[in-house]
Amino acid sequence: MTAFPRYTGNCPRNVAKDAKYAIRSGPNGSVVALVYRAKAGERWLATTEDHPDLVHMVNQVKLAYGSSHHGPFYINEYKQVLVPVGPSTEYYLAGEYNRPLVFEFEGKRLSGDAVDLRGRGLQPGDEWEGPHPGIPYVLAAGGKDIYYEVEVRKNVTRRVQLSAAIGSEQAARVASLITRYKGWQGGRFYVNEWRHMFAPISQTGTWKYVYLGRLDVENGWFPKPSGIG
């Protein structure tokens, strides 16, 4: 049986069903599935059969450390496929996957690219109409740093700050891209495998997702996770 490294980087936890991908059973075998929350309260279940290699990668991990195949997975901004397994939700690294996920649903094209449902490109500040799968990060209160938290052992978490990775001044510059729309109070935002950033923002008493721009991981971001074991 193939062994996979345990992933100890930024692991999504307690996220909604539409903030993750999943492997499901389809009419002709396993498929990659996406839950998309459309306007008017509709929930679309979009699937694609175009990624058998990705299906195999995820299912290998599920079978190696769980009781069955299928289930949720994530792809981070470094194209690493993260697979949660078991009742205690341990994460494993299945490998890297570079092909973009694109779903077709009732004539609409769904992907993590920065376009609306009509295929028009987005600018920072526009409403994010794309799917919600992504890796969550937090803009710190005050708007000058970004962090995520990892569980180092039972009932113990550790905060990992961008300023510790690239310095306070550079971290503040990156954070300013988020602060422009999230505000100084901070809060959660997401980065998807296309390296696009989006966040839930309250405007006029209602919440909507807003596009924040594309992340430049080469010039100021957390390093590619290598602390796995």
Image (tube, rainbow, N blue to C red):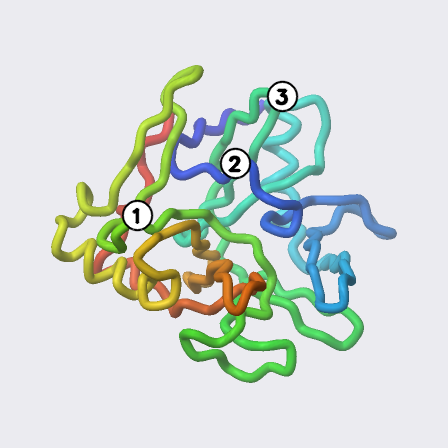
In the figure, is residue 177 to the left or right of 172? Answer: right
Instruction: Please name the amino acid that badge 1 sits on.
Output: Ala
| Quadrant housing the N terminus | top right
Distance of label 2 from label 1 (alpha carbons): 18 Å
Q: Residue tagged by mark 2?
A: 13
- The secondary element bearing badge 3 is classed as loop
Q: Are marks 2 and 1 in contact (CB under 8 Å)?
A: no
Tell me which numbered mark, 2 or 3, is placed earlier along the sequence: 2
Residue 140 is marked as: 1
**Residue density around tag 1, few if under 14, some if 14–19, many if 20 or more, within 10 Å:** some
For image coordinates 35% across by 52% down, the residue present is 186
Residue 87 to residue 191: above or below:
above
Q: Residue tagged by mark 3?
A: 87
For image coordinates 40% across by 25% down, the residue present is 151
In the figure, is residue 85 to the left or right of 225? Answer: right
Residue 214 to residue 87: above or below:
below
Of badges 2 and 1, the one in the foreground is 1
Tell me which numbered mark, 1 or 3, is placed earlier along the sequence: 3
Residue 120 to residue 41: above or below:
below
Q: Nearer the viewer, residue 39 or 119?
A: 39
Of badges 1 and 3, the one in the foreground is 1
**Residue density around tag 2, few if under 14, some if 14–19, many if 20 or more, within 10 Å:** few
- Quadrant assignment, res 206: bottom right
Q: Position of residue 185 (x, y in %)?
A: 34, 53
